[in-house]
Image (tube, helix red, strand yellow):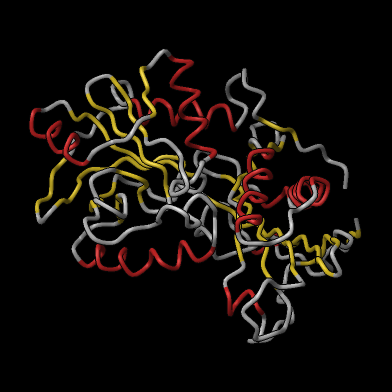
Amino acid sequence: MIIQKSTAPRISEFDPENFSFGNMFTDHMVICEYEDGKWGEVKLMPYGPLPFTPAMMGVNYGQACFEGMKAYKDKDGQVFIFRPEKNFSRINKSASRLAMPEIPAEVFLEGLKALVDLDRDWIPYGEGNSLYIRPLIFATEEALKARISNKYMFAIVATPAKSYYSAPVSVKISDYYSRAANGGVGFAKAAGNYAASFYPTQLANEEGYEQIIWTDDSTHEYFEESGTMNVFVRINETIYTPPTSEKILDGVTRDSFIQLANKRGIELKVEPISVKSVIEAHKNGTLKEIWGVGTAVVTTVFKAIGYQGEKLELPQLPLEESFALTLQKDLVDLQTNVAEDPFGWRVLVEKSI
C-alpha cells in the first residue's frame, strides 16, 4: 500500500457539534485502479478531485455500484467498524452483476482499515454519531462504446455522520412506480437504482411524504423496500420483513435486526407482506409499527402511511413499548462498544499509521 498523507489537513475545520451529513469529507481517500485484467497497488492519498472526461464509460453506461458502512468511536477513543465482511461480499455481488471485476479482499479490507485508522480524528463521538464510509467501483475507460469497460477504479471516501432522520417520517405506498423487477439489478447497490428512485420520491414529497414504500412491479400488492431502506412491519407482537430476492437488497442492518430480534425472543417472520394485510391491520388496531432500516439511517420509524389518497396515522410508541426503538438501541450499543458483542460483528481498528 502506498500511503501519502495530506500536507494540508482540514480536520481543524470540522466542528463535531455542528455539521451536516454527506457534505464534508475526511482528509484522505483510497484509490485502486484496474487495467489489463488486474488490480494495481492500493493508494491511501489526500482526498480531492480526480481527472476524468465526459467520455468515461461509467458515466455513459452506468457500470457503477457502491457500499455504505460506518466506523464508530467509544468513550475511550477506540475505533470500530461493523461487519465489514458483509459489505465486502455484497460489493462483489453487485460488481459481478454489472460485469465488473471483483475486488480482492486485501484491497477492500486493508484499504478500509487504513483509511479509518489514518482519519480516526474525523469520527465524532456521541449518540447517533459515526463516520459514514462509501466504498465504490466504477468504469473509467474513455470510450463511447456500449460494452463492458476495460478499466475501473475502486475508491473509498468517508464523511462524518449523525442521525439521518431525526423524527418519524410519513411514507407513501407505491401503486404505480417500482424500484426493481425480476431479472434486474434490485439486489445490487447499483448507482442507477437510486437515480431511478428520485423522480417517484419527488412526486411523493410534493404530496407531503418523505419516502416511498416500494411494492412489487407486477401487482403492487406486496411490500419490498422503503426508500433506500429495508422495511419491517409489526402486527400485534410479531415482526414481519420481506425475504430478500432479485429485487430486494440483502441489507446488513436488516440482517442485524433479524438476529437481534431472535436473541430477544421476539417473534419475527421473514415472509411476503401484503399491502392488504397492513391496511386491514391498521383498521382493526393490530398494526403497531412500521419502520425502515439501513446503514445511513439505522432506524426510521414511520408516523403515517399513504395509500390510494388516504393518509393513515400510526401509533408513536415509547422506547419501552417499541420493537423498532428497542432493537435500534441494541444495535447501536453493540456498534459503539457500550454492550457486549456476542456475534463478533464489531471489528477493532488498531492504530498503526
**Residue 146 horizontal side relative to residue 21, left or right:** right
Q: What residue lies at 67% left-to-right and 24% top-to-bottom?
A: 344
The quarter of the rendered structure image containing the N terminus is bottom right
Number of numbered tags placed on the structure image: 0
**Residue 188 horizontal side relative to residue 180, left or right:** right
**Residue 175 horizontal side relative to residue 110, left or right:** left
**Residue 41 horizontal side relative to residue 213, left or right:** right
Question: In x, y percent, where is residue 303?
Answer: 23, 43
Question: In x, y percent, where is residue 110?
Answer: 81, 47
Question: In x, y percent, where is residue 219?
Answer: 24, 51
Looking at this view, name the residue that lies furthest to the front: 183
Q: What residue lies at 66% left-to-right and 55% top-to-bottom?
A: 96
| Front position in the image: 78 or 286 | 286
Q: What residue lies at 70% left-to-right and 36% top-to-bottom?
A: 77
Q: What residue lies at 50% left-to-right and 23% top-to-bottom?
A: 259
Occupied quadrant, residue 290: top left
